Image (cartoon, rainbow, N blue to C red):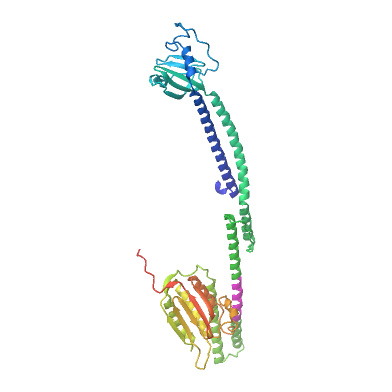
């Protein structure tokens, strides 16, 4: 049942229940406090000075056993005056149970009262009792002399009626408090959930229209404001991701258009020559097929690069500890056959990192391919060497190419970006983007800058250590 309630109704119910419970607890506590105070007042009236009362009642009752003789019977003393109008209900009780009541209905004597006749003078007993008329009273019994106790009572009827009236008043106040609590709960829920309502409307709008440019006004620094800021950040990230995806598709389509057009042209030429009965000669046919193969290889590389870049950040092989210097040497071995007459000099010191070996090796190969491709021929002796250095966790790849204009350096790791000096060379512009992604996945940093004396210098920094980590305990 509660699971089907709205958040506003649940918050209203909780606030109303909490306020109502607080009012009810306060009302009950108030009733008990008033009851305790009223009883204390009754007890204080019973604990007052009893000297005059005791003198009068001893004069009123005969010297013999109380209750067995009327006033003045068998006595030479003059009968005492009549009972004063303001005398509280009192009675003398003898050890044998005889009573001499004055000023009200007699009080029923209990064994505890009789036991007090043998106690030392001044001993007291406070209890609830009942008169012979059935009225509930508060009784104070105390020993006045050996064998005789004085019992004084106060009616509890007025106290009971006061408490009953107070209970009715507090019940009414509690009922009004519950109504006020419900109103307060509605007000609090509407006020507190207004930002949540705006957030809900924004989320529903995004789900309905896919408009990721929707933003929620953020006011303050409370949890609702933080939720709104997080929603804005989320929609901003989704908008950026969709824009990057759209740009990737557009750029991929643009890059694929050229090789596809070339492939279609060459295949059409081959088919027309066959259909016209004038087949190409062996050499032109070999060159045409070699061109087709090169174009297919270019497309395969482009598609592989696109698949690599389209993987999410967490879609990679589990990171394991690996020897990065071995990865660098393996990449150099792969790059040397494609380097032709460009020498590659390697100096790799031990460095152990955690990452994906295949991704890191491909990143180093891409750096080497770029360095080889752009290496210049400064003299007739041949191209300048490509220098590869791995020291203290920093890999540097230096070439002797033309370098990159300073205004283009911020864009070198963008997808499909190509330098103005490299647009006539083969390539898709995805190699450095793949390098940046692989290094970032391994927790490192990559940068490209112009080297002193010409050429470019690529720097890759990966966290790690010069020695492998100690193996963990077995099991």
User: In the shown orientation, is residue 475 left or right of residue 436?
Assistant: left
Query: Within the image, what quadrant is residue 248 found in?
Result: bottom right
Magenta stretch contains residue 258: yes
Percent position of residue 12, x then y: 59, 45
Residue 122: percent from left, percent from top: 42, 22
Question: Within the image, what quadrant is residue 201 found in?
Answer: bottom right
Q: Quadrant of residue 206?
A: bottom right
Q: At 60% from the left edge and 64% from the top edge, which residue is drawn?
A: 236
Q: In the rendered view, tell whether residue 142 sits above or below residue 275.
A: above
Task: Give the side of residue 80 with respect to residue 203, left or right.
Answer: left
Q: Quadrant of the C terminus?
A: bottom left
Q: Is residue 112 visible?
A: yes
In the foreground, 367 or 35: 35
Magenta stretch, main secondary structure class = helix
Q: Position of residue 33 (x, y in %)?
A: 52, 33
Q: Residue at x 61, y 47 (%)?
A: 188
Q: Is residue 318 above or below residue 217?
A: below
Residue at x 61%, y 44% (from the top left corner): 184
Residue 458 in picture, x, y percent from top left: 51, 79
Q: Which residues are magenta?
A: 246-260
> Can residue 331 be seen from the camera position used here?
no
The outermost residue toward the bottom is: 380
């Amino acid at each position: 049942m509660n699971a089907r309630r709205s958040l506003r109704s649940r918050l209203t119910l909780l606030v109303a229940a909490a306020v109502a419970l607080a009012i009810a607890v306060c009302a009950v506590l108030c009733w008990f406090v008033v009851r305790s105070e009223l009883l204390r007042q009754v007890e204080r009236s019973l604990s007052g000075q009893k000297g005059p009362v005791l003198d009068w009642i001893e004069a009123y009752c005969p010297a013999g056993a109380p209750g067995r003789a009327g006033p003045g019977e068998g006595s030479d003393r003059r009968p005492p005056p009549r009972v004063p109008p303001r005398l509280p209900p009192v009675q003398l009780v003898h050890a044998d149970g005889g009573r001499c009541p004055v000023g009200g209905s007699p009080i029923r004597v209990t064994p505890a009262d009789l036991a007090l006749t043998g106690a030392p003078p001044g001993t007291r007993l406070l209890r609830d009792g009942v008169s012979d008329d059935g009225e509930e009273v508060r009784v104070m019994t105390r020993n006045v002399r050996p064998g005789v106790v004085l019992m004084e009572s106060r009616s509890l009827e007025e106290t009971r009626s006061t408490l009953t009236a107070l209970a009715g008043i507090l019940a009414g106040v509690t009922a009004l408090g519950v109504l006020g609590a419900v109103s307060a709960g509605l007000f609090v829920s509407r006020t507190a959930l207004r930002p949540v309502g705006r957030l809900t409307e924004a989320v529903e709008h995004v789900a309905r229209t896919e408009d990721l440019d929707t933003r929620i006004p953020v006011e303050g620094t409370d949890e609702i404001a933080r939720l709104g800021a997080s929603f804005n950040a989320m929609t901003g990230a989704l908008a950026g991701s969709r824009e990057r995806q759209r740009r990737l598709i557009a750029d991929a389509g643009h890059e694929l258009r050229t090789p596809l057009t070339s492939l279609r042209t060459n295949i059409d030429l081959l088919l027309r020559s066959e259909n016209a009965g004038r087949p190409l000669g062996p050499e032109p046919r070999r060159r045409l097929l070699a061109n087709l193969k090169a174009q297919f290889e270019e497309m395969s590389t482009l598609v592989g690069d696109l698949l690599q870049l389209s993987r999410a950040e967490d879609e990679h092989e589990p990171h394991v500890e690996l020897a990065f210097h071995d990865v660098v040497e393996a990449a150099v071995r792969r790059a040397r056959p494609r380097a032709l007459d460009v020498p590659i000099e390697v100096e790799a010191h031990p460095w152990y990192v955690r990452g994906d070996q295949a991704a890191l090796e491909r990143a180093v190969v891409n750096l080497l391919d770029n360095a080889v491709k752009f290496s210049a021929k400064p003299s007739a002796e041949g191209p300048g060497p490509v220098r590869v250095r791995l020291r203290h966790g920093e890999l540097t790849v230096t070439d002797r190419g033309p370098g990159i204009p300073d205004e283009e350096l911020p864009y070198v790791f963008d997808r499909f970006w190509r330098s103005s000096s490299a647009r006539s060379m083969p390539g898709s512009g995805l190699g450095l983007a793949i390098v940046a992604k692989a290094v970032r996945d391994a927790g490192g940093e990559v940068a490209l800058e112009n080297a002193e004396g010409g050429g470019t210098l690529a720097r890759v920094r990966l966290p790690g250590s010069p020695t492998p980590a100690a193996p963990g305990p077995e099991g």
